[in-house]
Amino acid sequence: MPVQTAREHVVALCLELSRRGYFAGTGGNLMLRIDADRVAVTPSATDYLEMGPDDVVVLRWPDLARLAGERAPSVETSLHARVLRARHDVGCSIHTHQPVASACALLGRALEVPAPWRATLGPRVPLVGYAPSGSAWLASRLARTLRPDTHAYLMRNHGILCCGADAAAALRALDDLEALSSQHLVERIAHQAHRTGQPALWRVIDALHARPAAG
Ligand SMILES: [Zn+2]
């Protein structure tokens, strides 16, 4: 893929992620493998609705030296680099604070994945233990959790990371993780509502069901 095409692709991807409500303002970031020697990464602290292709940072692979782009690369660059280093099948890694899956990440438990979602997510969505955003500690915690058959990860009290062979596969994982998380929360809240008889809990379930589908 030519470098400029990759940078344009990252801009389009960020706009799509913002449209779906997965990126908000400057929150969320991603890395795209361009070829064997280069990756593209979102710039740090940049409004994705204002970003142009020249703002996308191009890094040399695998030492991450900056080849193009005036801005600093995302603070989560080393997080994504861990994924692309460990998983040669992965061409795109995306970190978001998408609303429902991030709520699941607050619960502090891995999610078992039912059959329909296993192809995009893997057998289980593991929980990566909490570490501060942008820290080497967070990157190494994720690296220890990475599995070859798992494309979605909950990052405790922070957000999520999904990966795929290309951007389209990573996007499908984000959508499926949001749907699985919604189902999981509805089940948990319904259980609690039956147990306690609190009408407010049913209103939460209605609100989760009323969320417009992404895509
Ligand atoms: Zn984050």
Image (tube, grey):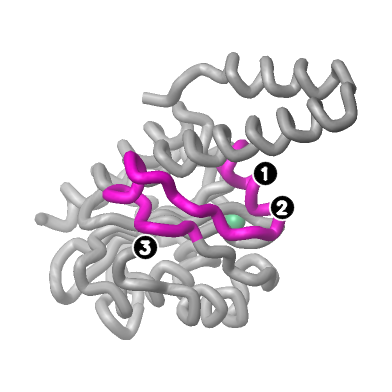
Q: Is residue 17 above or below residue 121?
A: above
Q: Is the C-beta separation of discs 2 and 1 under 8 Å?
A: yes
Which of the two residues, 34 or 195, is positioned nearer the viewer here?
195
Q: Label 1: which residue?
A: 103
Question: x%, y% of residue 179?
Answer: 48, 34
- What secondary structure is marked by label 2? helix
- What secondary structure is marked by label 3? loop
Magenta residues, start to end: 98-125
- What secondary structure is marked by label 1? helix
Which of the two residues, 7 or 204, is positioned nearer the viewer here?
204
Q: Is the C-beta separation of discs 1 and 3 under 8 Å?
A: no
Q: Label 2: which residue?
A: 107
Q: Quadrant of residue 42?
A: bottom left
Which numbered dot is residue 132? none
Please indicate, yes or no, whether residue 161 appears anywhere in the rendered image: yes
Between circles 2 and 1, the one closer to the viewer is: 2
Where ligand 1 lies, by quadrant? bottom right
Query: Distance from label 1 to label 3 (Cα)?
Result: 20 Å
Looking at numbered disc 2 in the image, what kind of residue is underneath it? Leu
- Which sits earlier in the primary sequence, circle 1 or circle 3? 1
Please indicate, yes or no, whether residue 42 appears anywhere in the rendered image: no
Label 1: how many Cα within 10 Å (few below 14, some 14–19, many 20+): many
Question: x%, y% of residue 31?
Answer: 35, 60
Residue under the point 57% across and 81% down? 136
Residue under the point 32% across and 85% down? 63
Q: Quadrant of residue 99?
A: top right
Question: x%, y% of residue 127?
Answer: 58, 64
Looking at numbered disc 3 in the image, what kind of residue is underneath it? Thr
Furthest residue in direction front, as rendered? 195
Looking at numbered disc 1 in the image, what kind of residue is underneath it? Ala
Q: Label 3: which residue?
A: 150
Left/right of residue 214 with respect to residue 164 in the rendered view: right
